[in-house]
Image: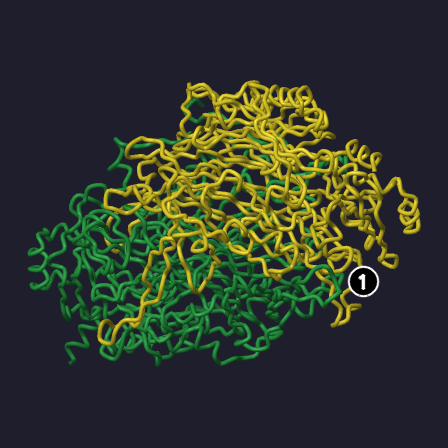
Chain colours: A yellow, B green
Amino acid sequence: MEGKSFLRLLFLIFSAVLLLLLTLLNLPTRRPARRSYSSTAAYSSSRTSPLPRATTPPTFPRHPLDPLTVRELNRVRTILSSTRYSRRLPTRSTPSSSTSQKKSKVLAWRKGDPLPPRKASVVARANGASHVLTVNIETSEVTRHETGSLSGYPTMTIEDMTSATWAPLSNADFNRTIVDRGIDLTDLACLPISTGWFGKSEESRRLIKVQCYSMKGTANFYMRPIEGLTVLLDMDTKEVIHIVDQGKNIPIPKAAGTDYRFSALNTQQMRLTNPISIEQPKGPSFVIEDGHSVKWANWEFHLKPDPRAGVVISRAMVRDPGTGDLRNVMYKGFTSELFVPYMDPTDAWYFKTYMDAGEYGFGLQAMPLDPLNDCPRNAYYMDGVLAAADGTPYVRSNMICVFERYAGDIGWRHSESPITGMEIREVRPKVTLVVRMAASVANYDYIVDWEFQTDGLIKAKVGLSGILMVKGSPYVNMNQVNQQDNLYGTLLSENVIGVIHDHYITFYLDMDVDGSDNSFVKVNLQREQTSPGESPRRSYLKAVRNVAKTEKDAQVKLKLYDPSEFHVVNPSKKTRVGNPVGYKVVPGGTAASLLDLDDPPQKRGAFTNNQIWVTPYNRTEQWAGGLFVYQGQGEDTLAVWSERDRPIENEDIVLWYTLGFHHIPCQEDFPIMPTVSSSFDLKPVNFFESNPILRIPPNVDKDLPNCQAAASA
Amino acid sequence: MEGKSFLRLLFLIFSAVLLLLLTLLNLPTRRPARRSYSSTAAYSSSRTSPLPRATTPPTFPRHPLDPLTVRELNRVRTILSSTRYSRRLPTRSTPSSSTSQKKSKVLAWRKGDPLPPRKASVVARANGASHVLTVNIETSEVTRHETGSLSGYPTMTIEDMTSATWAPLSNADFNRTIVDRGIDLTDLACLPISTGWFGKSEESRRLIKVQCYSMKGTANFYMRPIEGLTVLLDMDTKEVIHIVDQGKNIPIPKAAGTDYRFSALNTQQMRLTNPISIEQPKGPSFVIEDGHSVKWANWEFHLKPDPRAGVVISRAMVRDPGTGDLRNVMYKGFTSELFVPYMDPTDAWYFKTYMDAGEYGFGLQAMPLDPLNDCPRNAYYMDGVLAAADGTPYVRSNMICVFERYAGDIGWRHSESPITGMEIREVRPKVTLVVRMAASVANYDYIVDWEFQTDGLIKAKVGLSGILMVKGSPYVNMNQVNQQDNLYGTLLSENVIGVIHDHYITFYLDMDVDGSDNSFVKVNLQREQTSPGESPRRSYLKAVRNVAKTEKDAQVKLKLYDPSEFHVVNPSKKTRVGNPVGYKVVPGGTAASLLDLDDPPQKRGAFTNNQIWVTPYNRTEQWAGGLFVYQGQGEDTLAVWSERDRPIENEDIVLWYTLGFHHIPCQEDFPIMPTVSSSFDLKPVNFFESNPILRIPPNVDKDLPNCQAAASA
């Protein structure tokens, strides 16, 4: 028992908000983004503000919300290994790169003020328990230390995941099984798959499942599953608990046609269009001050990378065109949790019910963006500072990009028709600012965009690309399939089935519309019948406002035939003509989870039971699936908090919105998926006195660039 | 009676598919689009295909689907005035600019073949009846002549509309009312408002309502309604039937803050961003052959302006990357009808239930696009050839634009995470082709985009901008409003209420997926419960395919909690692994009409009763609200056709999709609305064997332009 505990300590897996030991641990020296700028010598330097560039992360914090710096992370590591906590915690502690700052202190802070004491949130696994600590970096004190009483474990570290993929190879039975399947062990690629939680047998040890693929003949091993082979591991000891192999008769699908790398397809390349680029002859119109404060057009906000959420937007403020004042819109917005249940109840698939932020770390999986392809030429790249499992800081280069977007869209327009005889044609182009991240959670790629419009709208958009999780099958053609057979998906290629699944992305949106105390108002459109003789019309729609008093009033399932607008208003601030100032959340295309509410995955993913929720602000309620999502049992989700039915009228409230996708794969998704996107908007509604971009000028030819093909330059 | 009939003949209002007498009747000499290209002398001319440019419309047709040319329209006019029809029809006949060609003949035609006989569809009003004629231009014969037996009248002509706005001024009572309201007659701007149909009293004469505004102090007279004043006119005689004035106590809202013209705001302009442009150093990648055949990347389609639909896309075909063959996707797609009911049952508002295509002519209202603002610099502009009320052809310049769009989006991507230790980062940028039109139906502006993606997806997008239709009100602040008062909208400014309304845009989509005979398949996602002991999971979603046998099987109301995919498949063509090839319609954000099904406007707009319908192809069923929508009673709508419940399995079928918006105005919409958009997609589903853009190359720096600010060039 002592030995086992020691082993556990040794292989310990820690943080909740984490890191990448196997990546570039060095500060990046290659800076493609910067090179891209310096090569465009023809750019005019006539604008006053400096060109945005990618820079190395700041050494010192300048804003209360700034993430922990390399220096601070090192300091946290030193504090935890040199204090009395070193006795109780492994020296390899696991700080999050996020700070822990009270909202009131952040709101009170003004540029030039001294920073509030810098504190680090640390989540660690040690001695079989989950620890949550707050470390005051300046005083070297640990000001809070709790041991998790909830079910579930912290987010896996990259070390957890990578070591899990290799662990089965130390098991002779596993190796024999692989060889029996005709696969050379050197061609093996394995994936760490979170187990979810399905009952008591899975309690009190950290478990992970491993499934493997053949990478022979392709970089796209995902398309060559060794179907039916599942290894259950103890994640702490790396002990193989058991191996199930139910797929001996299922062939490994062929490698041909699966590779997607340009280098592998170079000879067959297909150039469909001439080069095209977004050009800004006077340079971009935004600056990023002090490393994290973005200023663009009429917007200002704080932007930071986060190991769990990926991107965090804070203190988003828009300038009022009437008063010139910056006005608060959103205190904080981020992707709080994802839920990706697969729709196959069989042994090798039932547990695939991923929660990518809390289990894998959405930010940890955000890979460096590819300049010119992930983001256009006018982009700025921001690095992330993350911590490895032992607390060592490292830099993820190009983790976020920021760029101005001009898609040829129209901000507003009006032509007079000849009916009135007036010769009017007024059109304003639309230019927006995009903040982008792309997380590759193993096979799948999520592209998260926050887009800011000059008319005050914020669009949150999620794109899905990457590679399907597929199932091996004996079938090579649908004509072999009986009517009664359930494929659980679509036959995409010989022996390859794309399994049906859903994606839910739940956003935390701490709206502070002109201040923290806000109300949530459902503006319901109801059919009114006219009285006999009242009107030639029999019916019309009437807007009926309902202010949500408590949380249950704000649990919303969207209904096409019982529609509402959903406003967050400031009840104590009104426009000139007396409307409460507000923002509304405008859903786009979405999907709802249809799983049984008592199904274990849906209990854990209960934050998807509604599309909209509103909770009172509570510093500890940020992660919709709970702080400890891994193997969590669902007792700390947004759904549970909301059932407390707390008052939310004229309070500091948080809006939660869940964007959903049903995905029935099709052959076009093979071997790599064209991006599918959906989005929702946060849109000003009686926030401004009138159209805030009435006075922007149209495009004129003399302002636009004079371009040559680079090759001929 | 004779005299009255003569008068009617004289003022006659005719065509269904119409024209703009008061606009530029001359061929355009100003060609900003072309100038824009010629000024960019730095463009490389290294590409083989010629640069697309705006050209004058072709003199001769080259394709069976080409619209009538100026020459052909003149010929039709001559035929109708010189044959025996001149006795029965006024010499001022009203040809549509559309041809009438059988689908089978169009499909059989190959480039180089002689064109099938050119025929013109003519809809005319004469002697109190609506005439539908087909004129064979080559033989000078009228091959079809029917007199409308249905209720309703043809689309108004521009002459109808303009003359209606002036007609009240010949009425002394009207003029007295205006002066009593304190308005100078020279400041008057009036609008022609379709009456809808509300019962027997409105039968057997063409009626229109006129409402007026003060344009004193602003070009945006729409914000200065003379509330409650409605003039009912006989549209043929221009006789004032009666005047209602119920708004004497409602002030005309102020002019201040309503003008939106740059020239009027020049001194207060607000420049938020530096110039930005989409640049293509080697020029655009598309060509438009023979005036109407668009070839871009892997797409080819026929594009033409249409007086009723606006834009018609025909014969859309995509090249298969495997075989190199062009494959049929859509025979024809266009905006068939709009329905815009306002939600105010009072006297001056109840009838506002516009059907913009059939009543006003969506294409007739498409104004010249503004280069650099409506469309980016790389756009090609296509003119429309339309016919005036007397049959005279005229040219609408820049009616449609075509451009390549690069918004910084991602076509597909995948990065390997460090878990697998593979260094992979493959990203492909997304470049699309957009076809755009902007129709200004009096106050409102509709931006219609057809966007083609290289991955086979077609996105149809509708943007709403322009100016609200507002209601005058005695209120200047919401604190004056009683709880019981119904404003029917939002107080936007002092004395101005933005009235709640809906917008529905119904698309005709004649899908021909690899051939004309297709089936409509609902792929329903159903929750399956597992049996006890079967799985740790209690539930999962299963895709259940239901092939629609008849029309009623394909009447679809979208349901978030009972979701389906909607496929149009070719049951006789399968992929290599045996899936039927198909395209699916993917709804985005939308709204459903909630009016009482027996409300007269909803009976006329019954094509909005479902979001999706499928009908068998029928040449006469193209206009969702019926051929004669104006004052129509709804007996010729899509809803009526669909009730015939005809077989649609493995038939030549037409898919109908309705995009909807509820619009509760807000102050940001005053005095001109920032664009709000929604869209739906037509997306390949097992149409290609695999991802069709697997082999496109990434962007590389050396291909991108080298730009200077134009001012410094």
Q: Which residue is mark 1?
A: A475
Q: Is residue A93 above or below residue B316?
A: above
Q: Is residue A299 left or right of residue A379?
A: left
Q: Position of residue B399 (x, y in %)?
A: 40, 51
* Res B36 → quadrant: top left
Q: Is residue A509 left or right of residue A392?
A: left
* Residue at x 14% of width, y 69% of height: B242
Tell me the crowding category of disc 1: few under 14, some 14 to 19, or many 20 or more residues within 10 angstroms, Cα based: some
* Residue at x 60% of width, y 52% of height: A605
Chain designation of label 1: A
Label 1 residue SS: loop
* Res B78 → quadrant: bottom left
Camera-side residue of B346 and B369: B346
- Quarter of the image for the N terminus of chain A: give it: top right
Q: Is residue B177 left or right of residue B414?
A: left
Q: Position of residue B484 (x, y in %)?
A: 23, 61
Q: Is residue A371 left or right of residue B17?
A: right
Amino acid found under the numbered disc labelled 1 = Tyr
Camera-side residue of A306 and A12: A12
Query: Is residue B275 in sight in this rendering?
Result: no
